[in-house]
Amino acid sequence: MKTIFDMSRPGRRGVTFPPPLLPDACFQEACLAPELLREKPAELPEVAEIDVVRHFTNLSRQNFGVDVGPYPLGSCTMKYNPKFTEDIARLPGFAGLHPMLPQLRRGGLLAQGALEVLHEMEQLLCAITGMRAYTMQPLAGAHGELTGLMLMAAYHRHRGNHKSLVLVPDSAHGTNPASAAIAGYSVRTVPSRDGVMDFEAYRAMLGPEVAGVMMTNPNTLGLFEPDIKRISEAAHAVDALMYYDGANLNAILGIAKPADLGFDIVHLNLHKTFATPHGGGGPGSGPVGVVAKLEPFLPISRVARREDGTLFLDYDHAHSIGYVAPFYGNFGVVLKAYAYILALGGEGLKRVAEDAVLAANYLRARLAPQWRVAVDRMCMHEVVFSAADQAAQHGVTAMDVAKALIDFGFHPPTVYFPLVVKEAIMIEPTETESKENLDAIVEAMAFIAKKAQEDPAWLHAAPRGTPVGRLDEVRAARQPDLAQR
Amino acid sequence: MSQYAVPEELKYTEEHEWIKVEGGLAVVGVTDFAQQQMGDVTYVDLPEAGRAVERMAELCVIESVKVAADVFSPLAGVVAEANAALGEHPELINQDCYGAGWLVKLKDYDASGLGELMDADAYAKFIERG
């Protein structure tokens, strides 16, 4: 495919501007400081409008997204985003709103609708998770984690606690220990046993120096942590806080509330659970919720209601950790998630979790004859297989399986994660895929298992039907060449 | 017979590192098992000489096509030298993990920690058990 630079021809234009009203001189020294002026013209491609349209349309045809086919990438729910939420976000009353408006004198009265969205969203997320209050500011999941850990630190500082350690299970997302480290904590890894946190090992690691325990429940093996109540109680006994990573909330929506499991701080990924764009389609949104004892520390501003019923931005919180992002977070994303929650309602959200769990268990049961299930028992919203047998017997790795699935019209599942499983293949079908699509995944995986025995070389050469074949990932990582020219 | 090389003369950890005492320094690297599990190494983030490390503290980070893995210091000590060759040639870890692919040499290390390390037999059994 030609690049847009290849298509460029000197003087070709998509739009013809009228002659400028101001003299040329105005664009030079008279108006702009010399150091702000370009020395030579920018090398932009010179193309007609149709060239631009074809270029980007063709690029999109070489890409794979959830609008093209199933996207069963595990551990980061990549579900379909219903298009009506885009319509809501584009309503001119929202899309044209200036973020400064509620901060101007009397401006808040002109932004009551947007403030109402933020206020109601806080209440909805509280109802879903059992938390007392939320901030919408964090701009993504990991940002939510850092915010949550800063709240944890503020709580302990306020109590006069001297704590230095955060415990994270070995099946956690890598962002958990990273966030804890950036927040200034040391991190210790709690081992798993049969795919869930080893309670005895955990209890042995708990001490007065433990500030908090970060958990994802269900965990990245798609397993609900059965000891969660005991884990929470043991943490609270040493005044450690329980942190809920909301990456896998999709599995328990409307069924279980993190607060009831003993969690004190929750971050949600609106771009995973509440069907807003994800993975390069962002921006994300990572609201953080807390129980009552942590509410004083939440970032400012908070949306509050006056006696006359109007809403305003409340900055009067002496113990707040301050801002973690400009304004009110990614408002457009919050708005889409709000629309999604209202459209589905409580019963609809519960069905999301039920269908997501059903779909994953269907794949687990159908694929188990050919692919070893990492922990072979009822799973939640995702299921982890291992290609370790195929790798040992036929030299076919999880990477080969992932690449071959592309030729069947599926986005590769997550491979080599979680790290506790060898040759891991993690599939999260989500609630949106039909039984026909799940059956197609089963057929493809069965075919690949058969090919692994008969013709491993065929799998090593996958994918075939893509614009480029198997990429040399080692060379790409060791000698990246990112420049167009 | 195991598919992983486990040289007789080295000491090992459960984190899949090897340790060799040589001329007053403790040389640390990752085992054949570790490099096979990680796959092709693409980058190694090495510590600076002079840094003091606790036992089990992060010593360096190895990135491969599959994972970014922390390497924990098997002994308390001070970094005497890191293997600069890995900067240009991280693949040395795959090609020769017990030789040219060494990671770090520790000085002033806590020799009492050596007693807690596994010998080759114990480590071979450890990886067999998986």
Image (cartoon, rainbow, N blue to C red):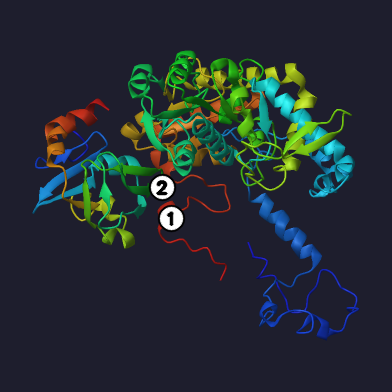
User: In this rendering, is residue A58 above or below B114?
Assistant: below
**What residue is shown with label 2?**
B65
Q: Could you tell me the amino acid type at mark 1?
A: Ala
Are discs 1 and 2 less than 8 Å apart at CB? Answer: yes
Judged left or right of residue A32, residue A229 is left
User: What chain does badge 2 belong to?
Assistant: B
What is the quadrant of residue A69 in the picture? top right
Judged left or right of residue B49, residue A93 is right
Figure label count: 2
Residue B96 — which label?
Answer: none
The x, y position of residue A97, in whole percent, is: 84, 47
Q: Could you tell me the amino acid type at mark 2?
A: Val
Judged left or right of residue A373, residue B60 is left
**What residue is shown with label 1?**
A477
Residue at x 42%, y 61% (from the top left corner)? A479
User: What chain does badge 1 belong to?
Assistant: A
User: In this rendering, is residue B1 above or below A330?
Assistant: above
What is the quadrant of residue A144 in the picture? top right
The x, y position of residue A92, in whole percent, is: 88, 45
If the image is split into quadrants, where does the C terminus of chain A sit? bottom right
On the question of residue A301 being in view, the answer is yes
On the question of residue B96 being in view, the answer is no
The x, y position of residue A215, in whole percent, is: 49, 27
If the image is split into quadrants, where does the N terminus of chain A sit? bottom right
Mark 2 crowd level (few <14, some 14–19, many ≥20, 10 Å Cα): some
User: In this rendering, is residue A149 above or below B46?
Assistant: above
Mark 1 crowd level (few <14, some 14–19, many ≥20, 10 Å Cα): some
Using the image as rendered, state which of residue A133 and residue B74 is in the foreground: A133
